[in-house]
C-alpha cells in the first residue's frame, strides 16, 4: 500500500478537493493510504466528515515556521519579491497604516530584486537550506509517504511540508488554492508537478512564477464539475427555503467583508442603496462571506431583503470556519436562480459568469475618501484582468448601480461576450471531468513516485 499526504489548511480546500470527485476516487483506491493534514483544532471535524477506512486524519500545529525569525523572514521575502500590482498595492496600504518607512524601503528593494528569476532561484535555495522544516518530521517518520499532494502551495504550512518532503526525497504534486494566488507572492518551493485549474492560471504560473511549462498540467477545477449540473433545488423549493416571492425578480448581493477596509461602511451603504429598489417588484438575497465579518450598524433590514450566513464555525473567529457541501450547493442555487449578481472584487464574479448571469462589480463609497480607505482591491492584478474582459459592469456611484440594475433586468444578455471570455480564461477545462483528471494525475504521480521531477 502506498501513502500520500493531502494538505488542508484553508477553508476552501474542503470545497476544492474533499467535496469533489477527486477525493471520492482517491479514497476508493484500496491500495492507497491517505493522510489528511489539517489544523489540530479541526481534526475531529475532518475525521468525522472525511476519515475512516484508508483515510487517516492528523491534526498539526499551524504556522510553526513563521514563529521563528528565519522562517518569518523568508515568508515575508517571498511576498515582497512578487512585482505585481497586487503586491505593491498591499505594501503601500501597509505603509499607509503603520508608517513604517524602513520596512517599506526593504520591500522596494526586495520587489526590485524579485524581477530577476535568477535571484528568485537563489532565494528559494537559501530558503530551503536555512528555513526550519522539521516541524513535520515526526509525521513523515510515522507514515513514510510516497508522495505529497499540496493543495495550497502558497500557504506557509504547505510550504514547510513541501520543504520537508524535498529534503527526504519525497515528490510533491501541487496546485494553487485560488485564482488570485499566482500574483500574491513568489513560490518558496516548486512542486515537482503543478496542476492548473485553467488556462489563465497555467499562463500566470509560468509568467509570474517562472514555473516550467513542461511540468504544468491543466486539469480544470474539481469543485466546478457539479456546477455543470445546474441547481440542486427547483426554483420553487429554493424560493420557499428563503421565504422568497417567486413572482418577483431576485438580486443576489455578496458583501465585501471587513478584511481590507479600516472602516467598512461600504457594504452597509450598498445595502441602503438596494433598499431603494421597488419592493413590490424586486427582492434581495444577501449572502455573507463564510469566513469574513461584515459590519452593519443600526441597519434596518426591509421585508424584501433576506440574509444568509453560510459556513461551519469552529469559534467566534470568522477565519475558523469550513465551507461545507451544503454551503457550496447553496451558492450554486443562489446564483442560478438570481437575475443579477452584485459583488465586490471576489471570485463570485467567476461563479456568476459560469452561469452567464449579469454581474455588477460594485465599488460604492458613501463619501469621498483617501485611496486606502476605499475598496482598493479592484486594482489588484487578477481583478483588473477580469474587468478587462468586459464581463462585469463596474460601478462606483449610487446612480450607476441603480442604472445598471435597470439595464440588466431589461436585457440579461448584455455583456454576454465578456462573460464568455471569463469562462474561456478561468473555466477552460470545465467539462465535468476535472475531478477525475486531478485524481488520475495524483494516482499516476504516486505510482511513479514523481519520476518526472524538476
Image (cartoon, helix red, strand yellow):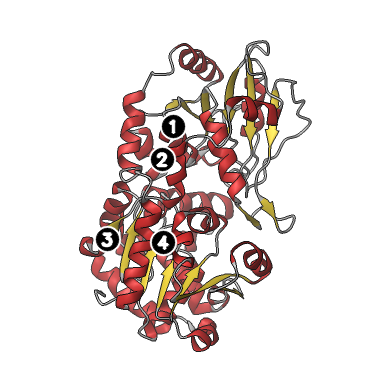
Q: Earlier in the sequence, mark 1 or mark 2?
A: 1
Whole-angstrom CA distance, mark 4 to mark 1, is 36 Å
Q: Identify the image quadrant of residue 205.
A: bottom left
Residue at 39% in and 86% down: 168
Q: Earlier in the sequence, mark 1 or mark 3?
A: 3
Which callout, 3 or 4, points to the residue nearer the camera? 3
Give the mark nearest the N terminus, 4 or 2: 4
Quarter of the image with the C terminus in it: bottom left
- Closest to the observer, 294 or 102: 294
Q: Which residue is mark 4?
A: 80
Q: Earlier in the sequence, mark 3 or mark 2?
A: 3
- Local secondary structure at mark 2: helix
Label 2: few (<14), some (14–19) or many (≥20) C-alpha neighbours in 10 Å: many
**Marks 3/2: CA–CA distance:** 23 Å
User: What residue did someone put label 1 on?
Assistant: 355
Do the residues under discs 4 and 2 have CB atoms within 8 angstroms? Answer: no
How much space separates mark 3 and mark 4, taking CA atoms? 25 Å
Name the front one of labels 1 and 2.
Answer: 1
Secondary element at tag 3: strand
Which mark is first along the chain, 4 or 3?
A: 4
Label 4 neighbourhood size at 10 Å, few (<14), some (14-19), many (20+)?
many
Which residue shows up at 67% across the image and 19% down it? 245
Looking at this view, name the residue that lies furthest to the bottom. Answer: 141
For marks 1 and 3, give the CA distance.
27 Å
Q: Which residue is mark 2?
A: 383
Of the residues tagged 4 and 1, which is closer to the observer?
Answer: 1
User: Which one is in front, 363 or 339?
Assistant: 339
Tell me the tag on residue 216: 3
The residue at 41%/58% (across/down) is: 176
What residue is drawn where x is 45% and y is 38%? 229
Amino acid at each position: 500500500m502506498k501513502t500520500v499526504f493531502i494538505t488542508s489548511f484553508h477553508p476552501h480546500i474542503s470545497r476544492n478537493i474533499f467535496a469533489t470527485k477527486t477525493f471520492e476516487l482517491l479514497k476508493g483506491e484500496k491500495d492507497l493510504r491517505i493522510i489528511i493534514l489539517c489544523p489540530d483544532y479541526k481534526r475531529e471535524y475532518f475525521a468525522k466528515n472525511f476519515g475512516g477506512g484508508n483515510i487517516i486524519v492528523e491534526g498539526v500545529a499551524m504556522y510553526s515556521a513563521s514563529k521563528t525569525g528565519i522562517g518569518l523572514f523568508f515568508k515575508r521575502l517571498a511576498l515582497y519579491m512578487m512585482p505585481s500590482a497586487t503586491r505593491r498595492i498591499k505594501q503601500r496600504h501597509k505603509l499607509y497604516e503603520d508608517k513604517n518607512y524602513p520596512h517599506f524601503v526593504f520591500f522596494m528593494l526586495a520587489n526590485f530584486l524579485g524581477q530577476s528569476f535568477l535571484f528568485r532561484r537563489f532565494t528559494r535555495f537559501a530558503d530551503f537550506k536555512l528555513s526550519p522544516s522539521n516541524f513535520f518530521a515526526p509525521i513523515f517518520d510515522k507514515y513514510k509517504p510516497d508522495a505529497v499532494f499540496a493543495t495550497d502551495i502558497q500557504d506557509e504550512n504547505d510550504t514547510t511540508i513541501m520543504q520537508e518532503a524535498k529534503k527526504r526525497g519525497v515528490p510533491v504534486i501541487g496546485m494553487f488554492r485560488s485564482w488570485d494566488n499566482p500574483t500574491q507572492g513568489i513560490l518558496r518551493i516548486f512542486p515537482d508537478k503543478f496542476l492548473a485549474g485553467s488556462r489563465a492560471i497555467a499562463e500566470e504560473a509560468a509568467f509570474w512564477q517562472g514555473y516550467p511549462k513542461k511540468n504544468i498540467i491543466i486539469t480544470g477545477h474539481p469543485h466546478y464539475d457539479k456546477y455543470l449540473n445546474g441547481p440542486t433545488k427547483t426554483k420553487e423549493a429554493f424560493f420557499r427555503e428563503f421565504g422568497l416571492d417567486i413572482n418577483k425578480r431576485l438580486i443576489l448581493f455578496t458583501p465585501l467583508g471587513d478584511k481590507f477596509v479600516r472602516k467598512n461602511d461600504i457594504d452597509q451603504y450598498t445595502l441602503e442603496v438596494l433598499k431603494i429598489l421597488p419592493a413590490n417588484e424586486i427582492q434581495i438575497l444577501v449572502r455573507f462571506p463564510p469566513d469574513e465579518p461584515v459590519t452593519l450598524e443600526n441597519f434596518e433590514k426591509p421585508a424584501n431583503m433576506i440574509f444568509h450566513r453560510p459556513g461551519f464555525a469552529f469559534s467566534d473567529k470568522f477565519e475558523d470556519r469550513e465551507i461545507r457541501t451544503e454551503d457550496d450547493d447553496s451558492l450554486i442555487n443562489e446564483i442560478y436562480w438570481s437575475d443579477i449578481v452584485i459583488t465586490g472584487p471576489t471570485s463570485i464574479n467567476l461563479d456568476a459568469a459560469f452561469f452567464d448571469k449579469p454581474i455588477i462589480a460594485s465599488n460604492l463609497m458613501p463619501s469621498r475618501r483617501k485611496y486606502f480607505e476605499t475598496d482598493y482591491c479592484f486594482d489588484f492584478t487578477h481583478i483588473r484582468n477580469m474587468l478587462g474582459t468586459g464581463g462585469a459592469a463596474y460601478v462606483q456611484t449610487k446612480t450607476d448601480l441603480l442604472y445598471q440594475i435597470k439595464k440588466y433586468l431589461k436585457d440579461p444578455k448584455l455583456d454576454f461576450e465578456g462573460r464568455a471570455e471569463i469562462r474561456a480564461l478561468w473555466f477552460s477545462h470545465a467539462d465535468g471531468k476535472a475531478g477525475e483528471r486531478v485524481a488520475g494525475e495524483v494516482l499516476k504521480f504516486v505510482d511513479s513516485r514523481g519520476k518526472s521531477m524538476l
